[in-house]
Structures are given as structure tokens and as C-alpha cells.
Amino acid sequence: MILEVALLDVRAHQTEAFEQAFQQAQVYISRQKGYLSHRLQRSMEKANRYVLLVEWATLEDHTIGFRESEDYQHWKRLLHHFYDPFPVVEHFESINADTND
């Protein structure tokens, strides 16, 4: 499982519109091959900052499958104009920590 993490800074005074657009956009990501789950959370300290967490089966399901899909074009049209600056996206993989020292 791969965790996609995106820190989203939304333009001031556009958070309500962003949240409404996200409600529409999430259908495009959730129907992708390899999609497992997603969660959007708003910062308690900075009202226009969000974190998007998406679980994918593989890195390629996100970077190739979704990003090269027609659905991504819809996602992009709905959401990308809200960001300032454009978000950095990172991918994380689970590690197995040995807890039996």
C-alpha cells in the first residue's frame, strides 16, 4: 500500500467553494484502479490549509493510472485553480518495524 500525501493551501476566502468542489471531484479519484481510500482534513491552526491522504495499491496506480486518465482532467478542472502555491505531493510506503528487541 502507498500513501499519497498532499498539503493543500487554498486561496483565502475560497475554502467553502473548494470543499464543495472536492465533494464533486472525489468521485473521479475513488473509481480508479488501485484506489483504496482517501481522507481530506482541514487544519485547525490555518483555516485555508488541508491535507489530502490517499491510499493506493501501487505508486503507478496514482502516478500513471490516475494522472494519465480522463478522470484526472476533470479533477484538475474542479480543484487546481484553488491552490496557492501549487501543492507538493509525496508518496510513502509502510515499513515493518521489528518491535521484538
Image (tube, rainbow, N blue to C red):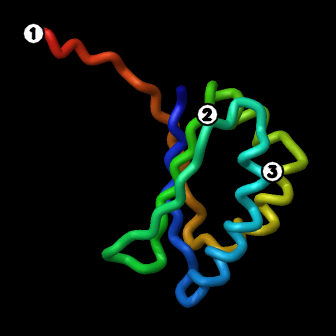
Could you say which disc has been placed on residue 57 in the image? none
Query: How crowded is the residue under tag 1: few (<14 C-alpha within 10 Å), some, or many (20+)?
Result: few
Q: Helix, strand, or loop for circle 2?
A: strand
Q: Is residue 21 above or below residue 62?
A: below
- Give yes or no for contact between labels 2 and 1 (Cβ–Cβ under 8 Å): no
For the point 78% across and 43% down, the residue is: 31
Which tag, 2 or 3, sits closer to the chain's start?
2
Q: Mark 1 points at which residue?
A: 101
Between the residue at mark 2 and the residue at mark 1, the CA separation in whole angstroms equals 31 Å
- At 51% across and 49% down in the image, what residue appears? 53
Q: Circle 1 — which element?
A: loop
Q: Looking at the picture, tell me which residue is in the foreground, 100 or 5.
A: 100
Where is mark 3, residue-wise?
72
- Element assignment for label 3: helix
Residue 3 x/y as whole percent: 51, 37
- Mark 2 residue type: Trp
How far apart are labels 2 and 3 at the CA level?
15 Å
Q: Of the numbered discs in the image, which one, if any, rests on residue 56? A: 2
Disc 2 crowd, CA 10 A, few/some/many (<14, 14-19, 20+): many
Asked if marks 3 and 1 touch (Cβ < 8 Å), the reply is: no
The residue sitting at 58% across, 48% down in the picture is: 38
- Compared to 98, does 38 lie above or below? below
Q: In this view, does 30 lie to the left or right of 92?
A: right
Name the N-terminal-most of marks 2 and 1.
2
The correct choice, above or below, for 17 with respect to 71 in the image is below
Farthest bottom residue in view: 13
* Residue type for callout 3: Tyr
